[in-house]
Image (spheres, rainbow, N blue to C red):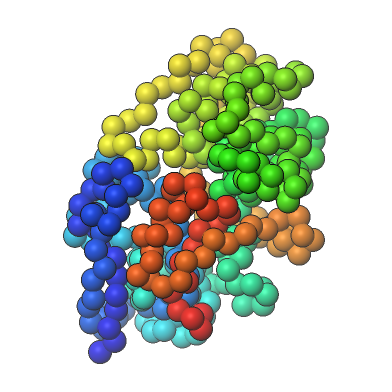
């Protein structure tokens, strides 16, 4: 029998105290049922949205995980066993599995997809060719409907999705403002990503900086909500668009986030605000990938990886992602030969 280590959700976390809420367990893997696929994890993706799954809230975009269950997350790895002929052993795949050495998945329920093995750095299937990039593309191009020459503001701009949103905006001809925490992240946004402006929300008055943009902000890619949304709304151009991708400001609370204090600006400036969730677009992956691959190969789209090594260090990586310690995509390398 093959042994398997996995992280189990024992309690609902209080704030960012994940060590008190999750435990690393061991098991012997059961034989696969018909239609199941087993994936040996090469890497795990650390994503802010999974914080909601750990809470008891039932009004989120996905039901909460039952206590005592394996923690769920996005996995990049290779098929080690299969009872689905579509996914033969050895196939490089990505899907929603578990924080574990081995994930057992039903492909149709886990969004499992076979991946192109020819990409030089296969981690880019978590990066420029992954769901963060898909999210950025849909949010900037379709939901925020950014046009060449317009001003696009992105919050949490030094995170995995924010970096992609900044680059997609530039590729579409927009002028980009990235909001991030700290001088190092702001330098990264302007010097590495080519953002037109970077605002340090920890050390600057965000609303005052945005007020300097003549004509106002045309589109806002919101990863945060809360006070940053209040800073942006009064500085939007008339008929501006807000694409709500995430609500990091609310993820460590079990109660809903209060509404924007400047909600009146939605009427005064005739704004459109729309939330979107990338699993709603998964069937369109084949449509997005050729352009994203082209931008990646041209050097216009990419992300640095903040990589922690070892399944036992998953909570370290998760905290780095949620607390803003990481620049780029936080991942965990599970298997050394993935």
In the rendered image, residue 104, in percent from the top left (x then y), is placed at 34, 73
Q: Quadrant of residue 270?
A: top right
Could one spot residue 106 in this view of the protein?
A: no
Q: How many marks?
A: 0
Whether residue 313 sits left or right of residue 255 in the image: it is right
The image shows residue 14, relative to residue 37, as above or below, that is: above
Towards the viewer: 94 or 334: 334
Q: Which residue of the protein is positioned furthest toward the bottom in this rendering?
A: 1
User: What percent of the width, then of the height, locates residue 170?
Assistant: 75, 43
As rendered, which of 186 and 224 lies closer to the eye? 186
Picture quadrant where residue 151 is located: top right
Residue 24 position within the rendered picture, expressed as x and y whole percent measured from the top left: 26, 68
199 sits left or right of 36 in the view: right
Quarter holding the N terminus? bottom left
Q: Position of residue 220 (x, y in %)?
A: 61, 31
What is the quadrant of residue 150 in the picture?
Answer: top right
> Compared with residue 14, is residue 302 higher up or lower down, i.e. above or below?
below
Residue 305 seen: yes
Residue at the image position 69 percent from the left and 44 percent from the top: 187
Q: Residue at horizontal 48%, vertical 25%?
A: 227
Point 58% across, 31% down: residue: 203
Question: Residue drawn 63% across and 41% down?
Answer: 183
217 vs 190: above or below = above
> Image check: 285 left or right of 173?
left
Residue closest to the eye, 269 or 6: 6
Compared with residue 20, is residue 331 higher up or lower down, i.e. above or below? below
């Amino acid at each position: 029998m093959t042994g398997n280590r996995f992280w189990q959700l024992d309690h609902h976390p209080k704030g960012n105290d994940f060590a008190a809420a999750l435990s690393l367990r061991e098991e012997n893997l059961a034989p696969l049922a018909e239609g199941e696929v087993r994936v040996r994890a090469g890497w795990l993706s650390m994503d802010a949205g999974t914080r909601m799954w750990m809470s008891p809230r039932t009004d989120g975009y996905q039901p909460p995980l039952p206590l005592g269950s394996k923690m769920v997350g996005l996995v990049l790895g290779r098929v080690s066993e299969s009872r689905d002929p579509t996914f033969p052993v050895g196939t490089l795949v990505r899907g929603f599995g578990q924080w574990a050495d081995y994930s057992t998945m039903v492909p149709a329920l886990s969004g499992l997809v076979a991946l192109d093995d020819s990409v030089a750095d296969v981690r880019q299937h978590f990066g420029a060719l992954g769901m963060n990039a898909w999210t950025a593309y849909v949010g900037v191009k379709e939901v925020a409907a950014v046009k060449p020459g317009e001003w696009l503001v992105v919050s949490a701009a030094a995170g995995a999705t924010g970096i992609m949103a900044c680059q997609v905006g530039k590729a579409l001809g927009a002028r980009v403002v990235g909001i991030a925490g700290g001088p190092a992240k702001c330098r990264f946004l302007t010097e590495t990503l080519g953002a037109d402006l970077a605002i340090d929300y920890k050390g600057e008055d965000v609303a005052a900086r945005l007020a300097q943009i003549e004509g106002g902000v045309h589109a806002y890619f919101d990863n945060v909500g809360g006070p940053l949304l209040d800073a942006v709304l009064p500085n939007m151009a008339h008929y501006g668009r807000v694409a709500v991708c995430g609500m990091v400001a609310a993820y460590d609370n079990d109660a809903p986030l209060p509404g924007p204090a400047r909600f009146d600006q939605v009427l005064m400036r005739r704004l459109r605000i729309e939330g979107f969730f990338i699993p709603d677009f998964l069937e369109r992956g084949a449509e997005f990938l050729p352009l994203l691959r082209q931008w990646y190969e041209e050097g216009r789209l990419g992300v640095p990886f903040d990589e922690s090594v070892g399944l036992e260090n998953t909570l370290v990586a998760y905290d780095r992602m949620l607390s803003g310690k990481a620049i780029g995509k936080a991942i965990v390398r599970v298997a050394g030969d993935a």
